[in-house]
Image: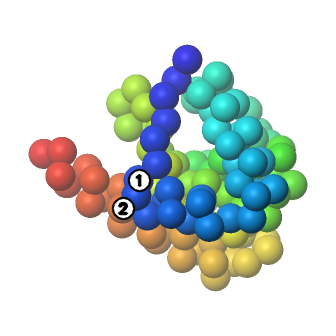
Amino acid sequence: MWTYRYLDGAEDERNALVSREKAALINAEAKLATFGPALPYPHSSAVRGADRLRELRPRGGRSPWRALYRQVGDEFVVAAVGPEAEVDPRGFAAACRRAEARLAEMEGQKR
């Protein structure tokens, strides 16, 4: 079983989702915990143009929301939750920037 955790800002973003979308994301998290890096498309996908960032795709990609994460050691760190790229390209790009900034801050604190 793999472990995952949410950074504070990302957890707030997840908690702000409507109940149905939050439940779908929680279900996707369970799949990530079970399959880890072997979680296949369409449940997980690399984010193009981002540094080692992946997107967790609830409901096999049919959800309008994505959890953005990176594997750090033996755990997955969810750094942002944002809209799906085709639904809201600017919102997705902003979520990617938040995720990368939060991960950089977290990794900087480890040193």
Q: Nearer the viewer, residue 12 or 45?
A: 12
Disc nearest the viewer among 1 and 2:
1
Q: Position of residue 16 (x, y in %)?
A: 62, 67
Q: Of label 1 and label 2, which has the lower sequence position?
A: 1
Residue position marked by numbered label 1 in the rendering: 7
The residue most toward the bottom is 90
| Residue 52 seen in the current view | no
Q: Residues within 10 Å of mark 1 (few under 14, many from 20)?
A: some
Per the image, the residue denoted by label 2 is 102
Asked if residue 9 is positioned above or below residue 56 in the image, the reply reads below
Numbered badge on residue 55: none
Residue drawn where x is 75% and y is 48% of the image:
23
**Whole-Å distance between the Cαs marked 1 and 2?**
8 Å
Amino acid type of the residue tagged 2 in the rendering: Arg
| Residue drawn at point x = 41 percent, y = 53 percent | 7
Residue lying furthest right in this view?
62
Q: Secondary structure at mark 2?
A: helix
Amino acid identity at mark 1: Leu
Where in the figure is residue 105, as x and y percent of width and height?
26, 60
Note whether 35 is above or below 49 in the view shown: above
The percent coordinates of residue 67 (x first, y second) are: 61, 54
| 2 relative to 97, above or below | above
In the image, 7: left or right of 18? left
In front of the other: 2 or 23:
23
Q: Residues within 10 Å of mark 2 (few under 14, many from 20)?
A: some
Residue 42 seen from this side: yes
Rendering quarter of residue 65: bottom right
Q: How is the image coloured?
A: rainbow
Would you say 102 lies left or right of 12 here?
left
